[in-house]
Amino acid sequence: MDIQDFLALGAESNTEGQVDLRALDHVSSYDSHLMCPICHCPFIKPVRLQCDHVFCEKCLRSAITTFHSADSDHFPCPSCRTPTRHVSMSVPRLLTNMCDEIQVRCPLAENGCQELVPRGHIQSHVEKYCGYQLVPCPDESCDKKTRKKDLQAEKRCRHSYCRCSRCEEDVMEQDYEEHDLELCPNLRATCVDCGTMVVQRTLKNHIEACPEVVSPCAGSKYGCQARIRRAEISTHEQQCPLVAIGPYFEAQNTRINSLELNMQHLQQRNEVFEDGLANIRSTLVESSRISSRHGSGPTADTDESADRASNASSSNATTYLLSLHESLREEVNQITYALTDLDARASMSIMNECLRIKEDMAHTNAAVNTVRMQVQWLMNPRLHNDTRTASLRANGANSGAEARQLMAASAPGPSNAAGASLGPLRPRRPSDGGREGTKL
């Protein structure tokens, strides 16, 4: 059915039993595959989606109502988010039976019921068989409720109070028997081991701590037959050799259990192999019989050939299995070698690619460093100031030389003409005076 019909069906039949199956105390363990992914409890009226995921009917209806939009005709699965348009009410009966066989405690355990029943029968147990179920009082004038097991054949009201003769307390008539036998604070009992008089309700705690109680040795599970007083049991356990080697026994038991599990696993594998061998042998025997029927010769020869064929078929089956095993082993070895080769090739390619990337990174780092140095030089104001000062000094020296030349040209005398004709004066060297004297 589609989603709308499923929601409409839930609105019409939205009735469940008075027992909340999700609030039950599950005593026996169950597989996690029997647990609803939404409420995390064993399935209650399971339904199935198109993706084969199973949910409780009430949980799925609540999820659809919460997350389904009115303008879409599909609903995403809460487990795999697969869009689905149909909900199937047909779930394998085995799944429902496995959920109903889980042992649960009676929901009236707080009232005193200690019954453990399968979950599928808990509703009928509470309604029909549980004696702690509260029912209306048979007396119409009484508005109180009474337990089913306290109802009398005469169907009279038992909510009247009566006084206890030991504790002088007023107790309801339906609870008087339990009060008189167990709950009365003045009710006393005698310890069987030490003979001490104690209150009835504390007798259990007294027995657990009484030093005169005879209890077995801690090594009784390993073979110790001693039963001694609780006050002397510690001294005995210090001297008992079975208690000393108890940890060794525990380790050996654990090892034996693991070996038994391995043996069971091997036996199952052996059964599978034997079934395969039997099938192969039967196939070969049938083929040999068919081939012998088509052949020619007397009957005795045919029987002998059939026996030989059966013997040969058994040996051929064993040989075939051995050859199949060897071929599978060779294929596994080849796959191993191929994987090793592929791993080596992948490692080499990764290494080569890493080397190339490292070279590119080195070139990139060098270029970045060069650009960094150029930018640093351009942005350093000190270098610009030094360059400007040097240029100003050079310009000042050139202007001073030009002024000296102008002053020399304006002075009177013959040297002006000579100087003007000869051009700019050169600095005089020390050897020029000697040369002039030699010429004169």
Image (spheres, rainbow, N blue to C red):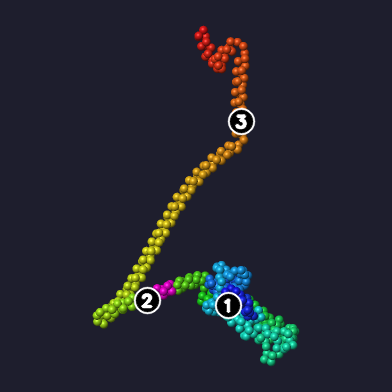
Quarter occupied by the N terminus: bottom right
Q: Which residue is mark 2?
A: 278
Determine the residue located farthest toward the bottom in the rendered image.
154
For mark 2, give the secondary structure: helix
Vertical arrangement, residue 353 with respect to residue 76, above or below: above
Q: CA distance from mark 1 to mark 3?
A: 96 Å
Q: Secondary structure at mark 3?
A: helix
Q: Position of residue 137 (x, y in %)?
A: 70, 87
Of the residues under marks 1 and 3, which one precedes in the sequence? 1
| Image mark count | 3
The answer to whether one can see residue 34 in this image is: no
Question: x%, y% of residue 95?
Answer: 53, 77
Viewer-closest of 218 and 115: 115
Closer to us: 344 or 245: 344
Tag 1 secondary structure: loop
Circle 1: is it few (<14), some (14-19), or many (20+) Cα within 10 Å? some
Q: Nearer the viewer, residue 197 or 161?
A: 161
Q: Find out whether the residues at labels 2 and 3 contact each other: C-beta distance under 8 Å.
A: no
Point out the stretch of residues depicted in magenta: 266-282
Residue at the (60%, 18%) spot, across then down: 405
Label ID, residue 45? 1
Dominant secondary structure, magenta: helix
Q: Label 2 is placed on what type of residue? A: Ala
Q: Amino acid at mark 1?
A: Lys
Residue sitting at x 69%, y 92%: 154
- Binning the other alpha carbons within 10 Å of mark 3 as few (below 14), some (14 to 19) or many (20 upward) gives few
The outermost residue toward the front is 71
Residue 281 lies in the magenta stretch: yes
186 to 434, vertically: above or below: below
Residue that numbered label 3 is attached to: 388
